[in-house]
Image: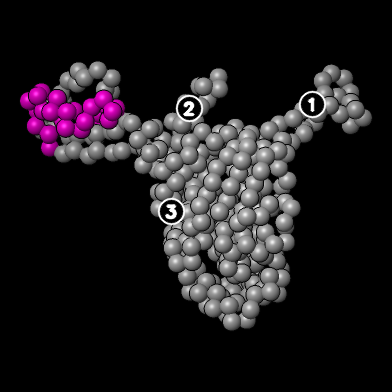
C-alpha cells in the first residue's frame, strides 16, 4: 500500500537580481524565494492497483515519484510505501520497490545488459533460482534476447526502457513506480511495454503508479486516474468518472443525401467538414444522441452515414487544466 498525507515539497530558488551588476549581486548576496512543487497532496493506493498519475510538465508528478521512492525528502507531510517511510527506511524500502525513469537508466552504460542484471542480482541478493526464473520470463515477455549482450549505450530507447523494466523487477518488488516509461518509444515497443506491465500486475499483483503523457497508456492500463496541477491533485477517480464529469461533449459527424439541415437546438454547434459532412457537437448531459438525430431528420434530408465520437482522455485532460487555470485566475 502507498499512502501520502498532506505531502509537500518546497524548493528554494535564487531570485534574479535587478539593475547594474545584477550577476555580481546574485553571487555575493543572493535573494531566495520558495517554490512549492508539491502542495499538500493526500492519496492511498491499494495493493495490486494500477494508478495513472497525469499532469502537465512542472505539475509535480516526478517530484512525487522521487519522494515515494526515497530520492527526495518531503518538506512536510507523511508518506508510507509498504509500511515504510522511504527517506528514513531507505535500505529496506528499496528492496520492496522498483523504479523506472523514462529519461534515465539504472543500468551501467558501458557494460552489457546481462552484466548489469547480474550486478543488480548481487546488490539485491537475489537467489540463483529466482534470478534465472525472472531472467527467462522477462527475456521472453520483453524480447530482451537480441540485445542482452550489448552495452547499454548501444541500445535504442525502446530497448533500453525494456531492459530497465527487467532490472526494476528482477528482485520481485511489491511496488513499481514508472515515470514516463514510454516517452519517445516507438509504437511497437510501447505496446509491448503496456502488455508487460499489465501482465506483471495481474499475475504477480505488483502495485503500479504510472506517470505519462501518453493517453493511450491511460486507456489501456489504468482504471483510476489522479490529475495533478500546480502541485495539487484536482481529480482522483476512475476513467469513466473522468469522462462523466469532464467529457460531456460528444461529436457527431453526418453525411446527408441532399441538402444539409438547419440545426436550431440551443447550445449545439455545427461545422461543415471539407468532405461535405456536417459535424455536430452537443452536451450529452443536455441532449441524447437520439434527440439530436431526430431533430436533424425533421429537416427532410435523409442521413446516409453517421459517426459518433466521445471525448478522448487527452481532450478531457486539456479541459480539466483549462477549468483549473480559470479558477486559479
Q: Which residue is painted at 58% across and 34% down in the image?
A: 232
The image's mark for residue 322 is 2
Q: Which of marks 3 and 1 is in front?
A: 3
Question: Mark 3 packing: few (<14 Cα in 10 Å), some, or many (20+)?
Answer: some
Is residue 235 one of those drawn in magenta?
no
Question: Dot 1 lies on which element?
Answer: loop
Q: Which of marks 2 and 1 is in front?
A: 2
The part of the chain drawn in magenta is 279-304
Label 1 sits on residue: 16
Question: Mark 1 packing: few (<14 Cα in 10 Å), some, or many (20+)?
Answer: few
- Image quadrant holding the N terminus, namely bottom right
Is residue 292 one of those drawn in magenta?
yes
- Left or right: 145 in relation to 275: right
Q: In which quarter of the image is residue 293?
A: top left
- Left or right: 9 in relation to 49: right
Q: Quadrant of residue 263?
A: top left
Question: Dot 3 lies on which element?
Answer: helix
Amino acid at each position: 500500500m502507498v499512502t501520502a498525507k498532506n505531502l509537500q515539497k518546497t524548493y528554494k530558488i535564487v531570485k534574479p537580481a535587478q539593475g547594474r551588476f545584477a550577476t555580481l549581486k546574485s553571487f555575493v548576496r543572493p535573494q531566495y524565494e520558495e517554490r512549492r512543487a508539491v502542495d499538500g497532496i493526500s492519496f492511498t493506493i491499494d495493493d495490486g492497483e494500477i494508478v495513472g498519475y497525469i499532469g502537465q510538465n512542472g505539475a509535480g508528478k516526478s517530484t512525487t515519484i522521487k519522494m515515494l521512492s526515497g530520492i527526495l525528502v518531503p518538506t512536510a507531510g507523511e508518506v508510507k510505501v509498504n509500511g515504510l517511510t522511504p527517506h528514513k527506511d531507505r535500505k529496506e524500502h528499496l528492496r520492496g520497490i522498483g523504479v523506472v525513469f523514462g529519461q534515465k537508466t539504472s543500468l551501467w552504460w558501458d557494460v552489457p545488459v546481462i552484466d548489469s542484471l547480474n550486478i543488480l542480482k548481487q546488490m539485491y541478493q537475489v537467489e540463483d533460482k529466482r534470478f534465472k526464473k525472472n531472467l527467462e520470463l522477462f527475456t521472453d515477455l520483453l524480447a530482451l534476447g537480441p540485445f542482452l549482450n550489448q552495452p547499454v549505450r548501444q541500445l535504442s530507447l525502446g530497448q533500453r526502457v525494456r531492459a530497465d523494466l527487467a532490472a526494476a523487477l528482477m528482485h520481485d518488488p511489491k511496488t513499481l513506480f514508472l515515470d514516463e516509461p514510454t516517452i519517445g518509444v516507438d509504437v511497437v515497443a510501447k505496446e509491448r511495454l503496456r502488455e508487460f506491465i499489465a501482465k506483471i500486475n495481474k499475475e504477480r499483483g505488483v502495485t503500479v503508479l504510472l506517470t505519462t503523457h501518453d493517453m493511450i497508456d491511460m486507456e489501456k492500463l489504468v482504471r483510476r486516474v489522479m490529475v495533478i496541477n500546480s502541485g495539487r491533485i484536482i481529480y482522483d477517480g476512475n476513467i469513466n468518472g473522468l469522462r462523466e464529469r469532464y467529457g460531456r461533449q460528444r461529436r457527431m459527424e453526418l453525411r446527408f443525401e441532399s441538402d444539409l439541415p438547419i440545426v436550431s437546438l440551443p447550445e449545439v454547434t455545427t461545422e461543415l467538414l471539407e468532405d461535405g459532412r456536417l459535424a455536430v457537437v452537443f452536451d450529452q448531459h443536455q441532449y441524447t444522441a437520439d434527440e439530436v438525430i431526430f431533430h436533424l431528420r425533421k429537416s427532410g434530408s435523409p442521413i446516409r452515414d453517421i459517426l459518433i465520437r466521445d471525448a478522448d482522455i487527452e481532450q478531457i485532460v486539456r479541459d480539466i487544466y483549462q477549468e483549473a487555470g480559470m479558477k486559479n485566475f
